Image (spheres, rainbow, N blue to C red):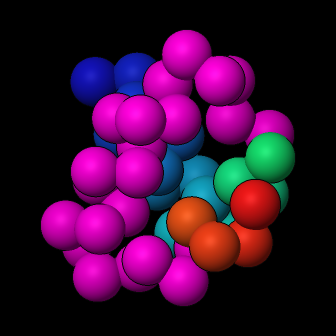
Amino acid sequence: MLAMLFARYVIRGLWKYNDIPMELREEVDKILIAEGREDLINAK
């Protein structure tokens, strides 16, 4: 659930991908891919 919150912030442009804690990045990656926003993952 926390990963979904971080993913939403990244999608909305409120946070950058680098702001996501390393522990949650794998889950956030899955959510971003499911949302069709792989481009945000590459912004590492």
Above or below, comparing residue 22 to residue 19 in the picture? above
Residue 8: % across, % down? 46, 55
- Residue at point 28%, 24% (across, down): 1
Residue at image position (54%, 83%) is: 39
Side of 35 where 16 appears, left or right? right
- Can residue 5 be seen at all in this image of the molecule? no
Residue 24 position, x and y percent, is 49, 25
Residue furthest to the top: 23
Residue 42 is at least partly visible in this image: yes
Q: Is residue 9 depicted above or below 43 in this figure? A: above
Residue 25 pos. (x, y %): 52, 35
Residue, far left: 34
- Front one among 24 and 4: 24
Q: Horizontal placement of 9 versus 34: left or right?
A: right
5 drawn magenta:
no
Is residue 30 toward the left or the right of residue 8 in the image? Answer: left
Image: 35 above or below 44: below
Vertical placement of residue 30 versus 40, above or below: above
Q: Range of the magenta residues?
A: 19-40
Q: Which residue shows up at 41% across the image and 51% down it?
A: 29
Q: Residue at x 59, y 53 (%)?
A: 9
Does the stretch in magenta take in 28? yes
From the viewer's perspective, tell me whether residue 39 is left or right of residue 32: right
Residue 38, image quadrant: bottom left
Mostly what secondary structure, the magenta segment? helix
Q: How many marks?
A: 0
Q: Which quadrant is the C terminus positioned in?
A: bottom right
